[in-house]
Image (cartoon, rainbow, N blue to C red):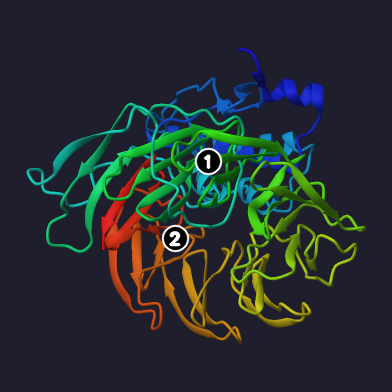
């Protein structure tokens, strides 16, 4: 097949993979293992020749198909083989981000290794476990009403009148496709709150999910970007990327800007999904694109910050620190301003202007920074290791630190509270002091991002969704789900809450 090589061929001819492609390969393998383990099978012979690297992401072949139930195979052995393979693909070492995970996979005690579903959840990088999605819990057999929602065959969608500016990511060679007929299941969960409004299958697990003006924008692990109506679940348009998309899109009144890990950035028409322009930022893009003045800004693995003209896609400026800090991620700034705030993989945080050769300020924190930074009001929030750090936006001085457990999620800030999660716990912190206001258990086996929608804090558990009072932490309700969430919940009009699940499905709840 043109453009397809095995991982073994790539390693033989090109050498070890860089950190970004290595993570993409790891995510694809974890996805495949989670799927087969979920139906009681194992791979049994995972190696570099059983992984195909395709233009649409990694694919795993050569499954032995041995059933663990029959005593023929052990899923934990697949997890061990996964760690050996990723270590080999990285040249004998893994990135600072992957190393702790791989060490757990190589634990001599099989019972202490993470499951393939756990790997999938971490590497999505949202919670994920892939199982065939059952009907939503406790649905009476004679109650649900199924309805077919036919997606528009022309790919036409919402107007450009009012569209939201959010976070960012990039699309390569977007091709508008007709999604044909989709199924939006209109169901009623009975008297229990919340109720399920609709459900629909999507290609791959949802990696990002945002809603504005009754339009949901989501990306999936099958390199898909799509827009759909929040009220009905009907697809308005679908486009495809050349490689996986990990970070939130930037949606404006004139374009949907997306960035894929391979380095391409594209602008899609918000009404049809057609590509307006495409630009190559160079090397691997880290984090999400952000808006800075009239530029769309991305950071790359080779330490460069690139500003791109939003209208035409031309390169406008580039900024590089004189010291190599590793990959760089820019932070979206909610209030605008003259400075752009950057975090580097080696723990450095800087404030820059594109026309000045030196940072306005720079500080080095202990431990690598792998989560996207946040800038809210007068603070820069950074997750390094298992610590959330708040920095003064004016000079970079540390305002406060909060220590959780490894794999803390990027924070969400509302009013005077900061919300973050780690393994199994949701925290609410005072935004000015970092003092803990409250905490609640979620039961998640790996961190599940928190979302604040309509005056409620939402966080996923192993196979449930929790709703909390954001001020007091009181648990308002817990709603069972078919499987894990793979993206933070997103809110639509009229109390509709959208969820992306590991079962390659979108669910809309009436809350």
Q: In this view, does 308 lie above or below 370?
A: above
Q: Where is residue 208 in the image (x, y as percent from the top left)?
A: 49, 49
Quadrant position of the C terminus in the picture: bottom left
| Residue 256 visible in the current orientation | yes
Taking the view exactly as shown, the residue that stands out farthest to the right is 322
| Residue 74 visible in the current orientation | no
Q: Which residue, given by chain and number where applicable, does mark 1 sit on?
A: 76
Instruction: Name the mark nearer the viewer: 2 or 1.
Output: 2
Quadrant position of the N terminus in the picture: top right
Taking the view exactly as shown, the residue that stands out farthest to the top is 1
Estimate how packed mark 1 is, as few (under 14), some (14 to 19) or many (20 or more) residues with alpha carbons within 10 Å: many
- Residue 278 disc label: none
Q: Which SS class for mark 1?
A: helix
Q: In this view, does 117 lie to the left or right of 483?
A: right
Q: In which quarter of the image is residue 440?
A: bottom left
Q: Which residue, given by chain and number where applicable, does mark 2 sit on?
A: 444
């Amino acid at each position: 097949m043109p453009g397809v090589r095995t991982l073994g061929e790539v390693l033989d001819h090109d050498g070890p993979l860089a950190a970004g492609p290595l993570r993409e390969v790891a995510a694809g393998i974890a996805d495949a293992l989670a799927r087969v383990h979920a139906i009681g099978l194992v791979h049994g012979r995972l190696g570099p020749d059983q992984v195909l690297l395709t233009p649409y992401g990694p694919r795993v072949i050569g499954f032995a198909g041995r059933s663990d139930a029959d005593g023929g195979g052990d899923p934990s052995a697949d997890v061990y083989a996964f760690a050996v393979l990723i270590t080999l693909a990285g040249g004998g070492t893994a990135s600072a981000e992957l190393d702790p995970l791989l060490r757990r996979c190589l634990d001599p005690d099989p019972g202490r290794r993470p499951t393939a579903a756990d790997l999938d959840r971490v590497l999505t990088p949202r919670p994920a476990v892939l199982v065939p999605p059952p009907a939503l819990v406790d649905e009476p057999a004679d109650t649900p009403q199924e309805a077919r929602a036919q997606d528009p065959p022309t790919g036409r969608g919402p107007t450009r009148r009012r569209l939201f500016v959010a976070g960012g990511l990039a699309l390569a060679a977007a091709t508008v496709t007709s999604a044909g007929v989709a199924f939006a299941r209109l169901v009623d969960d009975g008297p229990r709150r919340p109720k399920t409004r609709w459900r629909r299958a999507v290609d791959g697990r949802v990696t990002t999910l945002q809603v504005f003006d009754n339009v949901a924008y989501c990306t999936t692990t099958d390199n898909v970007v799509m827009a759909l109506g929040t009220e009905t679940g009907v697809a308005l348009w679908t486009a495809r990327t050349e490689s996986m998309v990990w970070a939130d899109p930037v949606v404006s009144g004139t374009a949907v800007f997306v960035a894929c890990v391979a380095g391409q950035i594209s602008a899609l028409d918000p009404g049809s999904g057609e590509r307006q322009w495409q630009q190559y930022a160079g090397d691997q893009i880290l984090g999400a694109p952000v808006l800075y003045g009239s530029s769309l800004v991305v950071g790359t693995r080779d330490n460069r910050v690139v500003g791109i003209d939003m209208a035409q896609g031309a390169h406008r400026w580039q900024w590089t620190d004189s010291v190599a800090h590793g990959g760089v991620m820019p932070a979206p700034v909610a209030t605008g301003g003259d400075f752009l705030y950057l975090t580097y993989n080696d723990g450095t945080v800087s404030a820059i202007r594109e026309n000045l050769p030196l940072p306005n300020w720079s500080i080095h924190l202990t431990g690598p920074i792998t989560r996207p930074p946040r800038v809210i009001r007068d603070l820069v929030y950074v997750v390094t290791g298992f610590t959330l750090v708040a920095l003064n936006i004016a000079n970079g001085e540390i305002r406060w630190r909060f220590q959780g457990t490894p794999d803390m999620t990027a924070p969400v800030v509302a009013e005077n509270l900061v919300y973050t999660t780690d393994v199994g716990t949701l925290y609410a912190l005072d935004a000015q002091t970092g003092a803990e206001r409250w905490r609640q258990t979620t039961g998640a086996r790996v961190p599940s991002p928190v979302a604040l929608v309509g005056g409620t804090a939402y966080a996923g558990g192993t196979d449930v969704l929790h709703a909390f009072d954001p001020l007091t932490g009181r648990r308002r309700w817990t709603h069972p789900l078919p499987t894990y969430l793979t993206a933070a919940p997103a809110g639509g009009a009229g109390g509709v809450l959208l969820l992306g699940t590991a079962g390659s499905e979108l669910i809309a709840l009436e809350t």
